[in-house]
């Protein structure tokens, strides 16, 4: 990953506002913005595509992400755009100013748009000091999102767009959510009718791209170089004794006892060195440790639900948390459950497993999932009783020779490496830039923008 990669976007500058008004949009609805066309599932994208449009393939799925630009975000603190309580779906991909998203399914010369979301506007009441300003500044998000969908259709020679009527969008909304019918009618019905020509056909608004082409504000193309350099990812599989219950019960009991203290030592050492790591946690005790881990800014992912090699790990994880983006396989075994379709259906954006199991040594994006290879771990310290110095020499050789390395250290094996962890981690800092697996995934996704 040391070669520069490029992300592509479209942008509409501040000076396009008069064109915006000439084409029938309201001046108060305009804000300068960037548009990203991403080859991935949006929030619940695969699930809703199958529910609302019918069976589809992963390569038909896209996500549009809108970022406000320049003066539109300068008056707000950057932290607001990364507040998980406001930006609930966490579709920022490390970039500030994310305002809205849409899920798309491309089916031949037709385009289906499933969900139109603006967490920033719809959830800003949780930060009441910004509520009025955010709502006023970005009140046109739904019109801008519709224009972005039309841009996608024009670029891809699509003849017809189908977007859900408000009743259909409501019917496919999570029943656990408290929804406002008026909001859905405004977003899915009135915003479309104000600026575009569309005809209702059953559950869908159908709009001809040719008929609406003159109403489009055509965005300009842009690109951004994503300079990588050598990337190192420090990961921890936090599993206590769950990985050894059957094979080594005595060790499992010891790991259950020592695991919590080992975790605290890892966090202390990383905090002293300013390192952000990825903690892959067994889901059944995720809620016991998550707050402590995230307090220091680390990335949290699932390491299965109970470290068993069986089915129902993904849905059980999602009962614990619905937003965690990553999944690290136990024992690096790609089970029958871990298909790309299942991972997408359950809203995962990345999968980490051994380089051997995946068949490659650098991150790739396949079937709308980022797959991240783990080059080595600390299992041999336990299994073969390898001396730490010998183990660390081999680890340093791998890091020195590779452009990308992610490795995993276990809490249950902490006694083998924690006494020398600070020195080892200090050496890692000399080789390259340390990133979390969320950060790696974000970069890979942006590098696959169209």
Image: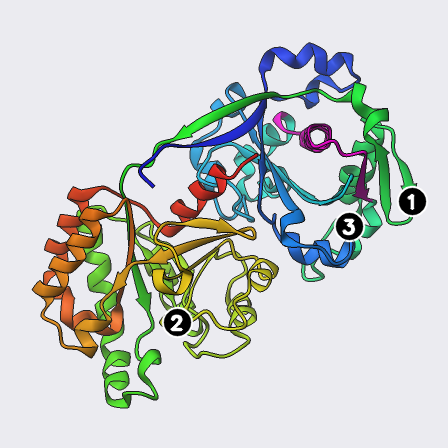
In this rendering, which labeled residue sits more in front, label 3 or label 1?
1
Picture layout, residue 349 above or below residue 259 = above
> Looking at the rendering, which quadrant does residue 134 occupy?
top right
Q: Earlier in the sequence, mark 2 or mark 3?
A: 3
In the picture of the structure, the residue carrying the numbered disc 2 is 330
In the picture of the structure, the residue carrying the numbered disc 3 is 169
Q: Identify the residue at horizontal 69%, vertical 23% (top origin).
A: 29
Q: Identify the residue at horizontal 15%, vertical 59% (top origin).
A: 394
Q: Earlier in the sequence, mark 3 or mark 1?
A: 3
- Residue 362 shows in the view: yes
**Secondary structure found at label 2:** helix
Numbered disc total: 3
Mark 2 vs mark 1, CA separation in Å? 47 Å
Q: Identify the residue at horizontal 19%, vertical 76% (top origin).
A: 382
Picture layout, residue 165 above or below residue 358 = above
Q: Name the outermost residue toward the front.
A: 359
> Looking at the rendering, which quadrant does residue 11 occupy?
top right
In the picture of the structure, the residue carrying the numbered disc 1 is 201
- Mark 3: give few (<14), some (14-19) or many (20+) Cα within 10 Å: many
**Secondary structure found at label 1:** strand
Drawn side of residue 46 relative to residue 381, left or right: right
- Residue 32 shows in the view: no
**In the rendering, at what x and y percent does residue 151 appear?**
69, 28
Mark 2 touching mark 1, by CB under 8 A?
A: no
Q: Which residues are magenta?
A: 137-164
**In the rendering, at what x and y percent does residue 448 appear?**
51, 39
Q: Earlier in the sequence, mark 2 or mark 1?
A: 1
**In the rendering, at what x and y percent does residue 232 appear?**
27, 48
Mark 2 touching mark 3, by CB under 8 A?
A: no
């Amino acid at each position: 990953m040391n070669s520069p990669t490029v992300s592509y976007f479209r942008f509409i500058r501040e000076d396009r506002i008069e064109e915006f008004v000439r084409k029938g949009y309201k001046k108060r609805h305009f804000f300068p913005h960037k548009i990203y066309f991403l080859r991935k599932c949006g929030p619940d994208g695969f699930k809703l595509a199958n529910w609302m449009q019918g069976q589809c393939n992963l390569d038909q799925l896209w996500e549009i992400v809108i970022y406000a630009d320049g003066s539109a975000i300068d008056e707000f603190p950057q932290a607001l755009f990364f507040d998980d309580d406001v930006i609930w779906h966490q579709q920022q991909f490390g970039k500030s100013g994310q305002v809205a998203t849409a899920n798309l399914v491309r089916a031949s010369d037709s385009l289906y748009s499933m969900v139109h979301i603006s967490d920033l506007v719809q959830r800003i009441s949780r930060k009441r000091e910004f509520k009025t300003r955010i709502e006023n500044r970005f009140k046109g998000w739904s019109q801008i999102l519709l224009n972005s969908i039309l841009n996608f259709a024009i670029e891809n020679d699509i003849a017809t767009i189908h977007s859900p009527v408000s009743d259909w969008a409501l019917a496919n909304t999570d029943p656990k959510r408290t929804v406002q019918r008026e909001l859905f009618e405004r977003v899915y019905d009135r915003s479309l009718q104000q600026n575009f020509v569309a005809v209702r056909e059953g559950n869908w608004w159908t709009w001809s791209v040719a008929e609406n082409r003159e109403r489009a504000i055509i965005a300009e193309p842009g690109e951004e170089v994503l300079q990588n350099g050598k990337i190192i990812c420090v990961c921890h599989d936090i599993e206590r004794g769950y990985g050894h219950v059957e094979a080594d019960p005595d060790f499992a009991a010891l790991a259950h006892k020592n695991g919590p203290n080992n975790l605290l030592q890892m966090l202390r050492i990383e905090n002293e060195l300013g390192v952000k790591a990825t903690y892959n946690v067994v889901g059944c005790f995720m809620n016991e440790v998550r707050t402590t881990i995230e307090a220091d800014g680390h990335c949290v992912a699932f390491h299965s639900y109970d470290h068993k090699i069986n089915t129902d790990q993904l849905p059980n994880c999602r009962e614990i948390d619905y937003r965690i983006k990553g999944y690290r396989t136990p024992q690096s075994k790609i089970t029958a459950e871990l298909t790309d379709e299942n991972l997408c259906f359950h809203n995962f954006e990345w999968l980490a497993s051994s380089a051997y199991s995946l068949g490659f040594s650098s991150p790739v994006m396949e079937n709308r999932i980022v797959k991240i290879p783990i080059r080595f771990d600390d299992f041999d310290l336990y299994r073969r009783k390898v001396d730490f110095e010998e183990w660390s020499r081999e680890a340093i050789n791998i890091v020195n020779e590779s452009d990308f390395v992610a490795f995993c250290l276990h809490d249950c094996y902490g006694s083998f490496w924690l006494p020398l962890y600070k020195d080892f981690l200090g050496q890692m800092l000399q080789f390259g830039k340390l990133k979390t697996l969320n950060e790696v995934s974000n970069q890979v996704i942006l590098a696959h923008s169209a």
